[in-house]
Amino acid sequence: MTKDVIALTSRMPDPWAMLAGLLSGGPDNLVDTAGEGAVVRLCDAEGRPLVSVEAPLLVQVQGEAERLLGATPPPVPYWWTEARATTGIAHAEELAGTFAARLATLAGGSAWPPEAARSLAVVKTEGVTVASPPTAGQPAVDVLTDKVAVVIQDRPVLAMTAWLSDAFRTAATAGLGLQVVTPPGTALSPAARDSLSAWPSRWVVRDERDGYYDGLTGAVLRWQDGMFAPAPSAEATADDPRTPVAASYKEVTATGERQLAVTFRTVHPADESLVLGGALESIWRELTGEPPAGWGTAEPANLPWSPRQITDLARERAPEPTWLVVVGGPDRPGLATVRISRTKAGVEEHVTLMFGYGAGEEPPVASLTGAAELLATRHHLQSMLVQLRKARRDLAVPPRFEGPGVPVAFVLGAEEVRQMPGDRARRTPLSPAPVPLGPTARPALYYPLPGNPSDLSGWQDFERLMRHLKGA
């Protein structure tokens, strides 16, 4: 199991502060480096990693420490330095805590969690030496089989941090899934949801009654054949392989909170004048009155919002795709994931965006038409789907059942409308009729979905619309 300790400091930890932290085990400790020097590790005599320290990250976005840790950081900008301790080895957590406490003292700030960083005293260790390369390759992995890599985490929010993203890449390169085990009090960041919903990767939740269950589906899990997999039900048959659902997953309390989820895709001509991120900023401003607050290639999102910087990064990485997380300010919880790809059609942006609303707040459904028109007329929109769902205002995904969203609108871009035979796109089996967006000669179409938000009839209307547009 890994235990994370994080120093949040107002000043960048200088080499002397880092050295003082690394000497938390005494002057005789040797260290190892990885990730081209971006990670420093203390290891035991058998080559097992005790503590892995990442390079300090400058966070310039307000609200990220509160969202991901429930901690109060120094005013932005501040420095975020992570130390991961392997708690299965004696003294490792003490080493990480002392490291973070010394950094917080010397660079001005605090450590999270507070109870892990109470002492500045040297931690007595013996036999610390340089790790052997095979062991050092995956210091955050607790169990490794021929099917999955298993990581045990204990954070309030399981986020798509740089190390978790690297763990996904390492596992995928080896042809493995990644399964992350957390206590029942942990929630999942929306940015990590897609990666942990792709089999055999899973979010595994420890549970007193059922042992383990999948935090996204509720399926009771058992360790079998080298991985966590659904436990068979007593009533299961070959034709009906039922899986029991954990009781904790079904314990849902109505709060009146909701989320507005928008998924859209744009395709831009690949030219030197292209600036990415404009579509996301346009719809964000239309629905909230403000631009996004920040972005990053992992969580925490550490950079102020800048379409120009996003464009430069995507160009540097091309033809490889670029994945981003974008966040809003604390007053209006908002989060988007963006995948930028270079294809034969041009430069594509796939965006999943959501905003959270409390029981007394009304999602701005009336603003959707204007937002869709901005994307269709200025940002080469291909398609967009809007849903309302009963879910937490803070956007974190709990290990409890959250019902599916209800579609409230679908938008088809102008080029897609033009390619439809005849007037199929304009004449649909639904009422009301689609709303033209943009130039009359070449409009995009906005389809209001009349389904009842309190049930799933919106999906029935959406399926009817999709069958009609496909000519089925």
Image (cartoon, grey):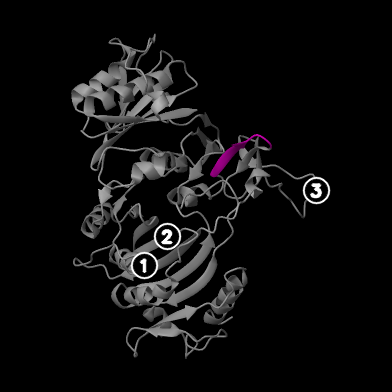
Q: Is residue 442 left or right of residue 180?
A: left
Give the percent coordinates (x, y) of residue 202. Answer: 55, 44
Q: Is residue 140 left or right of residue 375?
A: right
As for residue 43 lying within the magenta part, the answer is no
Category of crowding for the residue at label 3, using alpha-carbon neighbours closer than 10 angstroms: few (below 14), some (14–19), many (at least 20): few
Earlier-in-chain disc, 2 versus 1: 1
67 up-or-down from 465: above or below? above
Residue located 43% across and 77% down the image: 412
Say what secondary structure mark 1 lies in. Answer: helix
Q: Main secondary structure of the magenta part?
A: strand
In front of the other: 14 or 236: 14
Cα separation, mark 3 vs mark 1, equals 48 Å
Cα separation, mark 2 vs mark 3, equals 40 Å
Q: Amino acid at mark 2?
A: Phe
Residue identifier under label 3? 235
Residue located 47% across and 18% down the image: 89
Give the percent coordinates (x, y) of residue 29. Answer: 31, 13
Q: Amino acid at mark 3?
A: Glu
Give the percent coordinates (x, y) of residue 370. Answer: 36, 76
Magenta part of the protein: which range?
201-209
Residue located 56% across and 48% down the image: 199
35 up-or-down from 426: above or below? above
Marks 3, 1: nearer the viewer: 1
Assess whether mark 1 and mark 2 are in contact (beta carbons under 8 angstroms).
yes
Residue identifier under label 2? 355
Residue identifier under label 1? 287
Q: Amino acid at mark 1?
A: Leu
Say what secondary structure mark 3 lies in. Answer: loop
Give the percent coordinates (x, y) of residue 409. Answer: 48, 74
